[in-house]
Amino acid sequence: MSGKEGTAPVDFHCHLDLCPDMRGAFDRCEAVRCITLAVTTTPKAFRRNQAMAGSNRYVHAALGLHPQLVAERADELTLFEEAAPSTRFIGEVGLDAGRRFYPSFALQTQVFERAMTLCARLGDKVISLHSVRTAKQVLDIVERTGVHRTCTPILHWFTGSKSEIRRAIDLGCYFSVNEQMLKTLRGRSLLETVPLARLLTETDAPFQSGADGPKAPGDIEGAVSMIAESHQIRAEYIKASVRATAKALVGE
């Protein structure tokens, strides 16, 4: 691996299909050799993302059923189950107990547990997990289904307590972090607790805001700087570490 590629960006949770120019977003990530997990919010959206990723080396489309959409899209769980064997990458899935989405929480739980049971049985999945106000419940389902034993769970924008972070580490989870979350007390606590080898960078584009508006996919410099400051290690070393972790997860 060349030195330049070894420090190329990693964006392990972003929504390329929700960017204003979907094709351009895919092409830019590939052009800069950004290892990208392009998560989707519905199984119907996954097929288009999968086709657009095509033979790309660096951009990987993930099959998702977002908890915030479960109330109106639960019937797509069958499509999720049909598509799951065709991909190693799952996301965005999980639970959301925010005020707007709590009315569907029981249904979210049923859908998420069924999805994780399937992934546990199929094995060899890399899974990006949503856990808004539900760290304990998400980890309970990860543990109960045994998906952590056959797959690799990655907690996206995780805001759990230190004890929940340690529990997730014990379960073998990884964590994808972005600049906006790392500016919070919970984000800094995560950096103090999680081993560097379990960290990945993400943008959650186009949903993370920066000084100049929404973050573009692959724009992880701010997150890298904050990780480097926390660990008192040069940014180039952080980039190389994150890159090595991402390459191992995607099977390069």
Image (spheres, helix red, strand yellow):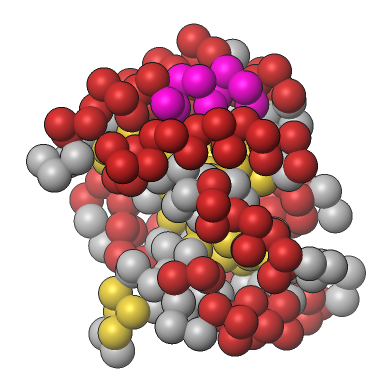
* Residue at the far top in the pictured view: 144
- Rendered location of residue 148, percent (x, y): 60, 23
Q: Quadrant of residue 163?
A: top left
Our reading of the magenta stretch's main secondary structure is: helix
In the image, residue 252 sits, relative to residue 139, either above or below, namely: below
* Residue at the far right in the pictured view: 1
Say whether residue 60 is left or right of residue 225: right
In the image, residue 82 sits, relative to residue 6, either above or below, namely: above
Query: In the image, what residue occupies the spot 49% across and 63% down?
Result: 14
- Rendered location of residue 67, percent (x, y): 35, 40
Quarter containing the N terminus: bottom right
Say whether residue 157 is left or right of residue 16: left
In the image, residue 68 sits, relative to residue 23, either above or below, namely: above
Quarter containing the C terminus: bottom right
Q: Nearer the viewer, residue 8 or 34?
A: 34
Residue 220 shows in this picture: no
Query: In the image, what residue occupies the spot 17% across and 33% down?
Result: 102
- Magenta segment: 111-119
Say whether residue 19 is left or right of residue 242: left
Residue 210 shows in this picture: yes
* Residue at the far bottom in the pictured view: 212
Query: In the image, what residue occupies the spot 38% across and 50% down?
Result: 157
Say whether residue 250 is left or right of residue 185: right
Query: In the image, what residue occupies the spot 73% across and 84% down?
Result: 31
- Rendered location of residue 85, percent (x, y): 74, 35
* Residue at the far left in the pictured view: 99
Q: Total label count?
A: 0
- Rendered location of residue 213, percent (x, y): 29, 84
Q: Is residue 37 magenta?
A: no
